[in-house]
Amino acid sequence: MSEILRAESVTVKFGGVTALDNVSLFVAKGEFLSLIGPNGAGKTTLLNTLTGVVKPVSAVLKLEDQNISGLQTHERIRKGLALTHQIVRPFTSMTVLENVAFAAGFKKVRKIWPSLMTLDRAPEKEKAVRFLEMVDIESYRDHEVSKLPLGVLKRLEVARALAVEPKILLLDEPLAGLNSQEAGKLADMVKEVSRQGMTIVMIEHNLSEVLRISDRLHVLDNGRNLAHGEPAEVMKQPRVRAAYLGG
């Protein structure tokens, strides 16, 4: 598979603390890569650096051979990155369908006059229905977001990210807060999105689900690269086991 994303020499400091120390990462097109490591390893910092939310001391970031290191967050999103968050923050004044339709209309709001002149929202709603079906919550389309359970909101977060038509879907702990049954079902859904051709980079602490659905693992520890490779082989490495279990 061809490479779609590469990060090289990523160093991030918060005051006197080095959060990432010369970290490198690559992702192949269509791959399901899980970014794992103990708490404080720098996983979310790395994703936030990829999207431009965190400004690194140094980094070379390439998306499909295009250097995106100097782009702002909204520019990187338009180039093909989409990030879901561990704590979901949908628009509570909108229905489920409206939340996704709003994201699906991102191209219209790039320029203010075309967005003001275009009153027809039917195309965006049609797209939204497709993404809701993809994450299996189409039956909630007209529900108020504020009254929905966490499992549905997690799926809505994924649908909103897919609606901006990304080349790479970045997931930050999508299974957090879910019971084992809900986590398994959501993991199955994310894997199905991957099977349909979406490149996915996922942070997740639920190792049983990570090992079940990932194509490859990349392990961080204390802000440094520790290991990467096929899931079962990576988890056999003594230094990886020590990072999780100690000793």
Image (tube, helix red, strand yellow):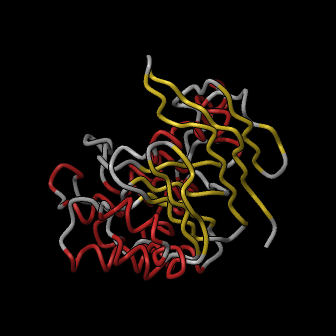
Q: Is residue 71 left or right of residue 200?
A: right
Q: Position of residue 123 (x, y in %)?
A: 58, 56
Given residues 127 and 190, the one toward you in this image is: 190
Given residues 204 and 185, the one toward you in this image is: 204
Given residues 163 and 81, the one toward you in this image is: 81
Count of marks overlaid on the render: 0
Residue drawn 29% across and 46% down? 87
Residue drawn 43% across and 25% down? 17
Q: Position of residue 113 (x, y in %)?
A: 65, 24
Corner quadrant of residue 109: top right
Q: Position of residue 213 (x, y in %)?
A: 47, 79
Corner quadrant of residue 28: bottom right
Seen as rendered, the residue at the extreme left is 147
Assign the N terminus to one quadrant of the image: bottom right
Residue drawn 28% across and 73% down? 183
| Residue 17 drawn above or below residue 207 | above
Q: Position of residue 230 (x, y in %)?
A: 58, 77
Seen as rendered, the residue at the extreme top is 15
| Residue 175 drawn above or below residue 99 | below
Seen as rendered, the residue at the extreme right is 65
Residue drawn 64% across and 71% down? 31
Assign the C terminus to one quadrant of the image: bottom left
| Residue 53 drawn above or below residue 3 | above
